[in-house]
């Protein structure tokens, strides 16, 4: 009975048609022998840039995960949003009899005294004060033409004053971003740029 379910929420018209780009806040709640594995609140991150935390929710549809607690019963998952009629879905969890298998004995788990895993209250996330090699950007770039490589190099040097344009790290960054530019016909999305930057910043010691 320790099952996992994926539930998708959408915002639709009265006739069931999907509303393109709808991104209102979504609030999930659950009743019965189940628990939400994902977050209870989904707030759109459409306008976020370089956020450290989030759900990656931009607009609907969006999914969440529900896990049963190992007990039979009715799980009811409800999603609410301001100004919109809420919706619920029911999941029936039942005991499944064991299928005999000669030579294999699988004893049922004893759920008595079992508790959910708790985070150690003494544990703390530590952010080290490390100066990154390269800085991220907060907007997309469009670089076309024969001078695209030169313009990109200029942008990187303006963004990171003091960086050695002849160094291995700069060369690796420039070549990786030029490959993305070529594949995307001159468009460099900020998320792609920052992904490459993060990779190189994590490898900082290799270039020192």
Image (cartoon, rainbow, N blue to C red):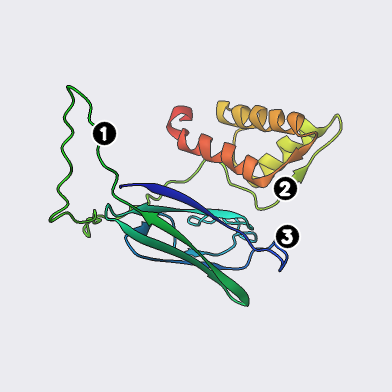
Does 112 sit left or right of 69 as displayed? left
Q: Quadrant of residue 172?
A: top right
Residue at label 2? 140
Judge depth for marks 3 and 1 and give the one in front: 1
Q: Residues within 10 Å of mark 3 (few under 14, many from 20)?
A: few
Q: Residue furthest right?
A: 145
Image quadrant holding the C terminus, namely top left
Residue shown at 17%/44% (left/top)? 109
Q: Nearer the viewer, residue 100 or 130?
A: 100
Residue 41 % position (x, y): 48, 65
Label pair 3/1, CB-CB below 8 angstroms: no
Q: Secondary structure at mark 2?
A: loop
Residue 192 % position (x, y): 64, 40
Residue shown at 18%/33% (left/top)? 106
Q: Earlier in the sequence, mark 3 or mark 1?
A: 3
Mark drawn on residue 99: 1
Question: Does the rendering let one see residue 187?
Answer: yes
Residue shown at 66%/46% (left/top)? 190
Mark drawn on residue 17: 3
């Amino acid at each position: 009975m320790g099952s996992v379910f994926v539930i998708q929420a959408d915002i639709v018209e009265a006739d069931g048609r999907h509303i393109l780009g709808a991104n209102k806040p979504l609030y999930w709640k659950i009743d019965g022998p189940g628990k939400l594995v994902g977050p209870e609140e989904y707030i759109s991150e459409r306008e976020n840039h370089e956020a450290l935390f989030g759900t990656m929710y931009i607009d609907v549809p969006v999914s969440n995960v529900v896990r049963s607690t190992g007990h039979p019963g009715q799980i009811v998952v409800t999603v609410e949003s301001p100004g919109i009629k809420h919706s619920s879905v029911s999941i029936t969890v039942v005991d499944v009899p064991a299928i005999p298998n000669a030579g294999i004995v699988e004893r049922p788990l004893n759920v008595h005294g079992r508790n959910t895993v708790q985070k150690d209250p003494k544990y703390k996330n530590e952010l080290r004060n490390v100066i990154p090699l390269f800085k991220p950007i907060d907007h997309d770039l469009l670089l076309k033409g024969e001078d695209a490589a030169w313009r990109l190099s200029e942008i990187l040097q303006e963004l990171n004053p003091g960086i050695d344009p002849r160094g291995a790290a700069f060369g690796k960054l420039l070549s990786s971003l030029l490959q993305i530019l070529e594949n995307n016909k001159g468009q460099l999305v900020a998320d792609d740029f920052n992904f490459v930057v993060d990779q190189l910043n994590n490898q900082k010691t290799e270039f020192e």
